[in-house]
Image (cartoon, grey):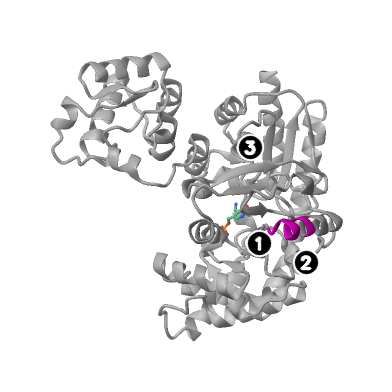
Amino acid sequence: MHEDELRLRRGYVTVDWAPEGPGVQKQIERYVRQKISSGDWAVGLKLPSQRTLARQFGVNRSTVAAALSELMALGVLESGRGGGTRIAAGGWALRVPAAPGWGAAMEEGGFRANSDIIQTINRLEFDPSYIRLGTGELSPDLYPRALSERTLARLGREICSMNYLEPLGLRSLRETLCARLNARGIAAGPENVLITSGSLQALQLISMCLLRNGSLVLTEKPSYLRSLQVFQSAGLRLRGIAMDGEGLLPSALDGNAQALYTIPTFHNPTGTVMSARRRQEVMDRCTALRLPVIEDDAYGELWLDETPPPALKTLDNGGAVLYLGTVSKTLAPGLRVGWAVGPESVVARLGDVKMQVDYGASSISQRIVEELWRGGDYDRYLLSLREALRRRRALALSALQTHFSSLADWNLPAGGFYIWLRLRQPVPTEMLFRRALSRRLLLNPGAVYDDGDNHALRLSYAYADEAALGPAIAALAEVVRGML
Ligand code: PMP
């Protein structure tokens, strides 16, 4: 296998420890040996760069270099193919009889690892000393605690079984969902709906069940889908389609592709809303090309100024659109409740595979969502959520106006969470990401959503504390200025 592909499959070593007190170099050597002899770090895994390790250990690069060269001399580490340092399979491993060949096994597995930046984000999001300026999630401040308390108390009294559910998910939840979808112009009955463990699972099921290895999937350029390895791990190729202010350009849709994945409403990461006219053009072109459409509507209910144009699914007469939704952005991603809506036979096929993969989404989560939807509590909550998001959006936009007007351009989001900040001069976004970390700012650089991007950042006004948004944006401007 090619070294680049191996790197994509292999896990990365992660460091969650720092030396304390005297003898720092020896402490690092002991730490690495202990990680290997316990089997936590598998033979064959590659270590991060010396610069990254120095930051993670909180020491000078020269100390890391000295510790690594000592471990190399002992045969614990070796030079990797294609550069870098990896855990040696030779003499050291032979002295660790308990360690099976996990390193090689991990390279065999078909699923790719997240990029280094995404893994770092996933880890540091749980370190409270960082301000999360890119997170696509609601702040804990916005969680409806009283509503949650009432709902859980009621369910505690009512629930009398927690068995597996039907293959497509809790029937009453699907019925309530259909009433909500019908009100938005989407014709669907309970047999058209599969409840998934988040919409991410719907994407995975689609990649496993509906698309063949080697298939070409079109997406907006940039796209959330690029930040994942779900499609690529299934052997699918992604091709980005340029966008303008009205959404993706229909002329670039191509009959050689096997599907279009699109986020027409409050696009992740750019915040763009596809215009009504463009929606019709896209559907006309997809129909002409017989191109199936995966419409991801994770943010559709989070409009802040006016209701967005109807979903592509409302324009779908022949069952070409698989429509995905989730409560992750409006309520709580930890519930892991999403849905896929499409033709009955397709939904049944996805549901059958879902039964083999996890036997259904969490029953308690499905009951919670049903309870919230049924009584109107959810819609009342959405009104107050929109109010809070408007306030946060205003704070972020005003801070950008003050600190970034000479440095960048950005969109005025009409809903969702994101501001797509485009720096006027290119910067290596990975370096920007690292420099921002040293100011305790956690960013989502544009390169995560588009390989070639070197000038954009996805900012989110939904997560950081309201009081922290302005100062964090000011600090970010300083980091950017320091790089120009
Ligand atoms: N689609 C889009 C466009 C998203 O932004 C996200 C979350 N970042 C997801 C899907 C996945 O959400 P979940 O699996 O939590 O429903």
Q: Nearer the viewer, residue 134 or 403?
A: 134
Would you say residue 287 sits in the magenta stretch? yes
SS assignment at label 3:
loop
> Which quadrant holds the C terminus?
top right
Could you tell me residue 70's position as x and y percent?
26, 16
The residue wearing badge 2 is 315
Could you tell me residue 358's position as x and y percent?
41, 66
Q: Which residues are magenta?
A: 284-290
Q: Amino acid at mark 3?
A: Asp
Mark 1 / mark 3, whichever is N-terminal? 1
Picture layout, residue 422 above or below residue 389: above
> Which quadrant holds the N terminus?
top left
Mark 2 and mark 1: span between their CA atoms? 24 Å
Picture layout, residue 234 above or below residue 67: below
Q: Callout 2 environment at 10 Å: few (<14), some (14 to 19), or many (20+)?
A: some
The residue wearing badge 3 is 450
Q: Nearer the viewer, mark 1 or mark 3?
A: 3
Query: Is residue 150 among the parts visible in the rendering?
Result: no
SS assignment at label 2:
helix
Residue at the image position 59 percent from the left and 55 percent from the top: 140
Q: Which mark is residue 330?
A: 1
